[in-house]
Each structure stands twice: as structure tokens, then as C-alpha cells.
Image: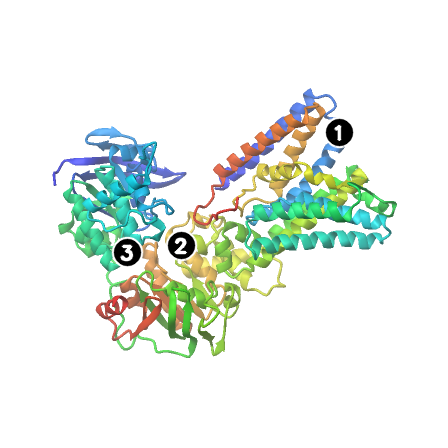
Amino acid sequence: MSQQPIIEMRDITVRYGSAVAIDGVSFDLRAGEIHALLGENGAGKSTLTKSMAGVVHPAEGQILLDGQPIAPGSPKEALHLGIAMVFQETSLVPTMTVGQNLFLGQEKMFNRLRGVNIAAQQFLQSLNFDVNPTATVDMLGAAKRQMVEIARAVLHKVRVIVFDEPTATLTPEEKQHFFALVKDLKKRGVSVVFISHALEEALAIADRITVLRDAKHVLTKPAQELDREAIVKAMIGRDLSNTFYGHKRGDEDSVRHEGKRVLSVQNLRMAGIVQNTSFSIFAGQVTGVFGLVGAGRTETFKIVSGALKRNWLHGGEIELNGHKVRYRTPAPAIRDGIAYVTEDRKVEGFFETMSPARNIHVGQLAKEPFWKMWVSRKAERILGQKWSEALNIKAVSRDVKVIELSGGNQQKVVIAKSLVQEPELIIFDEPTRGVDVGAIAEIHQLINRLADEGNAVVVISSYLPEVLALSDRILVARQGKVVEEFTAREADEKKIMYAAIH
Amino acid sequence: MPKIEFSQQLIVAVVFVLLFGGLSLFLPGFFHLENMIALLQSVAILGILGLGMAVIVIGRGVDLSMIAALAIPSALTLQLATSGVSPVLAVAAGFALAAAFGAVNGWLIAYAEVPPLFATLASGLFLAGMGQAWFFSIESVPLPDALEGLRVLGRGQTAGLPNSVLLLLIMSVLVWIYLRKLKLGAFTYAMGDNPRGARMAGLPVRPMVVLQYMMSAMIAAFAGLIMASSVGSMSTRIFNSTWIYDVILVVVLGGIGLSGGRGGVTNVLIGTALIGTLLNGLTIMDVSFPVQNLVKGFVLLAAIVIDSIANPRNEETAQQGDI
């Protein structure tokens, strides 16, 4: 690894409208290094790398490549300069084969599929990637898609690859494989920028670490000089001893005991995804549901809340407070007191053109009896105020649109929209995904409070420390089925992981 | 992006003032009382149709069958009245047909999950064909004497204002109440903004779609009655005209984003004023029909391009097949 920077960014400022996404940040990347970029959501990590890759254009500042100023106008230009970015959402064409995707944009005038496949096969083998070049991309899992993206970048002989949250959708084994790939890239002299939320990963794999906070640069240091606490402190600007993740609730006093049985699921099935699962949920405690991606947790609880339908025949039974229920849409489930807080708030959660108050109000209107037709803007304002105070939703003004809020505040709006419907069974699906550290603590407090008030609370999470920190009782799902149940006292990371994988 | 929405409204308003002023100054016969009344009347029906279309577009749909819903139910009313059915019953039958037709549209879109573009294109053809083939022996159904009372709608004046314009204003207020004061309106905006989110929040999404298409069909039938009363007949041939594009033009030009969830009654009125003036000016200038279409096509394209820049589609919630 040479000390000579391959890319140097000086005093970069990026504005989106009036909002400053990056404020005078300098960043450098050396040849053949792995450089982790850390920070809370909205700290400007993605924006910084996007300006390097030509996706956004900085208002001020300079980008130097080998000492020469560059201004990539588009991702394509950046690719020509040797800078590739692998986004959170992959940029592959799902209906095309792996081979076609690899050579996309480089095809000869008369393109022979056979030739493409042979070339792709040879190339993938030279990288030691186990991907079938004739498979269409939409049939591949997240890990293999990433391999194809990496292969494409290598094929373009890039010198810099930016990974934006590459490990978020990978299973532990796939993560190990991914890290091996990144180390291999490094050996080839490629520089890697690695944006992540997972501090441990960054510490394990990176040569240097840069932390951003509130659009500003905080520190850049070799990874071996940093540890978890130092990074967290840099990320949030204050000490955050044990107020969130990292301590498990095992002591006798803090564990809540189960109340009445609110939900009982028997032999639930949904084609291919939920396979004969059975479990119960009790009032007055938090039930954590852990599992790897693809374990059918989200689907199971979407069936409970009416968003998905189980099999018509042999679909199993769901009892809510002792009554059999089968919902075709979420509306009757909400009337019966089931709230489901989605993991994907942008697609299924909030209404982006509306203010926080209007969002919450729509939730209330949905629950009100049908004959109450008249909408009162005053009631809406009062409602918005009440919930903003209750959940500490911070908005610049009352009329600001939800889409302009931070991830944490958006999540709080979505939660408020469900809580206003007065549920007794509340299902949180990945409640802190894409939420800043400060808001995570607040959302965890809220979840605890809801359980203390006697509600049945379910927390689906892929993040073990979160499950351990919140749950009084832990269900582990694997391949469409709840396979194991632990009390908070007997649970530990090893046992849960073992149940989830084997 | 409130700024851009505002500026789009403002641009259209400014263009309208310039166009109106220019035409008044330089086009003899434009700023005449008779012409103004003709302009307002032609605009009134377009505006009422635009209100119906606005409800649909805000809920992230489109209704290409509005002209069929304008022509056939009102022609049915005239035909029934001609053949001796009591006027009240005839009018009721017309609206019942429109409501049933809207319900079919809504069912196709909400329950059969046909994209609105195709559903309403096909259903409009079906209704027009059904009317022309079964109901009416002649293409143009005259307004019978029994319905003479309806003439008030299209021809009368109240305090110097043509009644049709008055009706546009009344309809505007009603649609405004629906959109801004009723729960249903809030639901329409929510569905247009984020259909999956609306479903997850427990809104009755499918019944709402049916209701919206019923509303647009009945508003169109009402516009049809006004038209019949002002012209003195209802030509079922109107379905073959390019009127539906004028309606879409009004809505998009006024600044109601085709991506749904945005805009309101004001936007329709602004768009109506501009298009009405433009068309009227072109007619007075004796611009040939093909050139008029050229101008309209150009304006519609420009409006849609501006719309897609000002209100970009949300890629994550956009579906294939909707517009």
C-alpha cells in the first residue's frame, strides 16, 4: 500500500436545494487500501462517494485523480476514469443474464450470446466467482448479484470501487465471502471505499476509517488505532455508554412476564415462504423475532396483519384473543387492534407529500367509523402536536413534508400513524433500520413503554444486539418456520445464531 | 417541492394573462361579450370534466372513458324522455347508467387490477359502441320538449353569468369539499401518494377506487346534460373527437401531477382558463383543425414534460403499466 493518494477530495460541499448534505469535507484514498466510511444516517457518507462517482455534482471543492482535477459528470464518465460504485440497490438489469450484464454497454455490433457466455464464464472463473453466466440476474441472491457487480467493475479495470452498505442484505457466510473478495481486490491494487453501519465489520476489514457527522468530517485514522467506543463517540459526538445496544436484559427484575395470550398461530403456511409455523404472542411483553433474511419473519407477520394471504387450503389458523381470524386486507386487522409497522417505510409507510400531522391523521381517519366523514384541520394540528411531543418528532416546521425529515423522524411518524389506531398487538419490523443512533434509543424506549402499558409487542430484527436488548422472549425463525424459543435469561448470541443457521 | 408546484401554477397563470391580454388587443372579435360568453361556456364543460379527471388523477389513475360517460348516459336521458318516460326518471336512468359504468371501471381497476389506462380505454369504447349500436337509432339525439326544463342548465343566465359557468363554480366547490373537507378526499390523496402505504394504513383502497371512478363518470354525465341542453341535442359521435385530450391537458397544465397525490381544484380552474382561451383564440383566428391539434399536442407534451420534472415519479412505488 503506497502512501500516495489515488483520489483526493478537497473541501467538497454538496447542496440539495437549501439543505447542505456535505459541508467542506476532505477525503483521500490511497492506492490499494480499504477505507471505511462511517457515520449516522444523513451524515453524508453516500453523498460524498456519489460526488466521487459522478452521481451528484459538488457545488464547491475539488476532486483530484492522480493529482489531476476531475469533474465526472455522470457515473459513466466516472467509470471511464476508473471509479465504480456499487449501490445499495444494485444497478444490474434483472431480466438479463449474468453474461449480458457483465458486457452491458460494451457489446459488439453483432453480439453473439454464445461468445458472451464463454467470455463471461472465463472471466468469472478467473476471479474464482461461482456464478453461472447464463442465469438471469433476478434468479440470483443478493450475494451473487454483488459478485456480478464486482466482476463488472473489475472487468472495466477500475481502480476505485465504492461499496454502499454492501453487507446489509448478506447472511454471515456470504459476508465472509464478500470480505475475501474485497481483500482480493485490494491485492490487485484496487482501492475500496466501504460505507457501512456495522462498526465491527469496518474495524475488521478496513485499513483506515473516516467518520462523518452532520455533513462534516470528524476524523480519519488507521483502523488499528480505533475501537468501537471511539468510533461511536465520533459518530454521535457524545458518550453513549450503555443506553442502547450492547447490554442484554437478563436480570430477573427487568424481564416482563407474559400476560394473556393475544395471538396464537397454528401451522401457518404460505407458498414456499412460510412453512408450517406455529407460535404465540403474549400481552405485556416484548417478543423478539430473529432470523436471517429469507426466514419468512416479515411474511409471517404480514399474514397476521392482513397484508398478505396465507394458503387457501391448509393455510393454518390464526387466533386473536381466542377468535379465529382471516384477513384479506389490513383494514379489518387494524380494526381488531393489530398494527404492523413496516420495515420499508418509504414504500409501505408514510405519505411523502404530506406533513407529519397529516400522515398521523390519515392513520386516525382509517380507524374511525365510516360515517365520520368531516375532516377537521384543527383536530389534525392538535393530533400532530400531541404525537410530535409524545415521540419527540423533530420537524423544521409544521408543514414540512415527511420526505424531508431524517430517517429517525420519518420512522417515528410511521410509528405514530399506527399507534393512533390504538392497537393492542404492535408488530415492529426492523424498527431501527436506517434510523440515526439518537432516535434508535428513543424508539427502543418507546417499545419498552408500550410493553409496560400491557400491549403485546413484537420486534422483528436482523440485528442480534437489538433483539437481545429489547426482548423478554425471543423466537428464532429459520426457513419459514419458528424453530426455537428462548427467554431473555437463557438467550445469548451464540445460541440464537446457532438456531437461526443450523 | 412546494416551490416548484407553486411556480408551475404561477407560470400557467402568467401565460394565461399574457395570452388573454394579447388576444384581446390584437384579435378583433375576441374581447366581445358574445365571444366571452361562448368562451366561458365552452370552458365550463371542459372544466367540469377536468374536475372529475382531477379526482382520478390525484388518486393516481386516469380515466380515458370520460367522453363516453359524457355522451351515452345523457343521450340515454334524451332518448328516454323522447319516448315518453317521465323527465325525472329519464335523468335518473342516465345517472344510474353513468354510476354503473363508473363502478365497472373501478372494479376493473381495483379488483381485476387492470391498469387504468387500458381499463378505461376499453370500457369507453365499449360504452360508446353499446350506445351507438343498441340505444340510439340516430347519431344525434335531439333534446325533446319534455326536457325543456333542462335548458336552464346550458342556456340560462343568472345575474349576467351563464348558468353553465355557475355550474362549473358549484361543481368546483363540491369537489373542493370532497378533496379537502371529507375523509374520502384525504384517502384519495393518500392513495395517490402511496397506494401500498394506504393499504397498509388500513384505508379501504379498493372501494375508494370504485367510488372515484363512479364520481368521474357521474360528473361526466352531468357535463353531458349541460352540453345537451346548450346545443339542443347530444351527438354520440362526440366520442370520436379528441376531447379527452383537452381534459387531460386541463388537468396536467393546471399542475396536477400525473404521479398522483398532488394538486387540487385551483389547478383545474387555472388549466381550464388557459386552454379555453387558447382554443377560443385559435378558433376565431380560423386556424384549421389539424393545426389546432398540432398546437394542443405541443402544449400537452410540454405540460407533461414540465410535470415529470416538477413532480418526479417515485421509482420505488411506481408500477408498470400506470402512467
Tell me if B140 is positioned left or right of A489 in this view: right
Instruction: Please give the residue where the numbered disc 1 appears in the rendered image.
Output: B35
Looking at the image, can residue A39 be seen?
no
Say whether mark 2 and mark 1 are on the same chain. Answer: no
User: Disc number at residue B217?
Assistant: none
Tag nearer the camera, 3 or 1: 3
Question: Is A487 situated above or below B80?
Answer: below
Q: Position of residue A364 (x, y in %)?
A: 53, 61
Which image quarter is the N terminus of chain A in? Answer: top left
Looking at the image, can residue B239 be seen?
yes
Q: Position of residue B272 (x, y in %)?
A: 65, 37
Tell me if B25 is positioned left or right of A302 in this view: right
Tell me if A380 is positioned left or right of A119 in this view: right
Q: Position of residue B87 (x, y in %)?
A: 83, 52
User: Disc number at residue A409?
Assistant: 2
Label 1 CA crowd tier, 10 Å (few <14, some 14–19, many 20+)? some
For the residues labelled 3 and 1, say whether their Cβ atoms are less than 8 Å apart.
no
Who's the residue at 81% across and 47% down the image? B79
